[in-house]
Amino acid sequence: RVGQTECAMPQHNDDIAQLAQEAKEDIAVELERLVADGRQWGGHDALPLKYREAVNTIFEHCYYSQASLDMLVSSCSNQPRHPFLVKSCNLNTLSEHVAEDMRGLSIEKFGVCPEIVISSGRERVETEVAAIGPLLQFTCVEILKNAVQSVIEKYGELEIDGLDEPPITVHCSRNDGAGDAEWVFEDSGKGLGGTRAGDTCFDALFTTRETMREPNYTYSRDFGVPFSGAGVGLLKSRVYLAMHDATIQIGGRAGNADGALVRVSFQNSVDEVLQ
C-alpha cells in the first residue's frame, strides 16, 4: 500500500511495536509450518541436496527477522532495562546460570546430569561482550543441551558420576590486545556423528537421531527453548551470533575419536559497540 494516501503511517512507538509484534507472530506461524513440513519430508537427510541451501536461507531469514523485530519492539519500549537491547554481557555469569538450569533440566529428564565446569583460567577473568542477552542465552542453552545429551547417550546414566574428568567444560577468555573474545564448549560425548559434523550440523532440520522428534516444549526457561525438536537450534544460534559479528565452529576434540568442541569467536570491543 505504499504511496496510497489512505495508508496511515504509524506515528507513535506503541503503533510501531504492535506492527512489529504482529509481524513476528506471522513469522512464527510460518516457521511452525516449515518445521512440520520438514518432519513430513523425513528431515534433513531426505531433502535433496539442491534444495538444502534454499531451505537454510528461508529459515535463516525468518530467524533474523524475528530477532530484528524483537529489537525494534525493544527500541520502542520505555523500559531502559528491556532484554532485547544491546548491552554488556558477561559470558562467565551467563554460562554459570545456563549450566545451573541445565543441571535441573537434565536431572528432571534423565535422572542425572554430567558435571559442567565453567573456566576462565587459573584465576577468574571476567569476559564481557556487547550483546543482546536473550540471543546469547539461547545459544548457550542449545550448545550445552546437545553436550549433556551426547554425554549421557555415550556413557549411560549409571556411569556419569564415575568419570575421572569433567565431561563438559566451558572456557571464557578475552584477548585484550585484539579486542576479541572466545567462548569454547568441549564435551566427551558421542559427538555429532563423525563425518556428519562440521557445517552440516548448521543445516535446517539436521539431527543425529535416526528419526525426527516432535518438539518438546516442556523446558521453557525464560524465552522458550525446546529440549529436543526438529534440528533448527544450531542454525538459529549461528544466525544470532552473526548478528553480533561472531562466528561458531563445531568439530571433534583433538586426539579424541568422540566428543565435540564448539568455538564461538567474538570480534567486537564492548566499549566501541556500546558507544
Image (cartoon, rainbow, N blue to C red):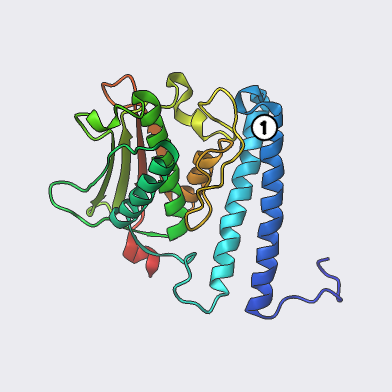
Front position in the image: 162 or 23: 162
What amino acid type is highlighted by mark number 1?
A: Arg
Q: Within the image, what quadrant is residue 167 found in?
A: top left
Kindly identify the residue that appears in the image at 56 percent across and 22 percent down: 210
Residue 43 in percent (x, y) is at 63, 28
The quadrant the C terminus occupies is bottom left
Front position in the image: 244 or 157: 157
Classify 47 as above or below 149: above
Secondary structure of the residue carrying numbered label 1: helix
Classify 146 as above or below 82: above
The quadrant the N terminus occupies is bottom right
Residue 186 in percent (x, y) is at 31, 35
Kindly identify the residue that appears in the image at 38 percent across and 42 percent down: 107
Front position in the image: 181 or 215: 215
Q: Which residue is mark 1?
A: 39
Whether residue 76 can be seen here: yes
Other residues around mark 1 within 10 Å, as few (<14) / some (14–19) / many (≥20): some
Kindly identify the residue that appears in the image at 48 percent across and 43 percent down: 238
- Residue 12 located left or right of residue 163: right
Residue 233 in percent (x, y) is at 52, 41
Total numbered labels: 1
Kindly identify the residue that appears in the image at 67 percent across and 23 percent down: 48
Residue 98 in percent (x, y) is at 37, 51
- Residue 105 located left or right of residue 24: left
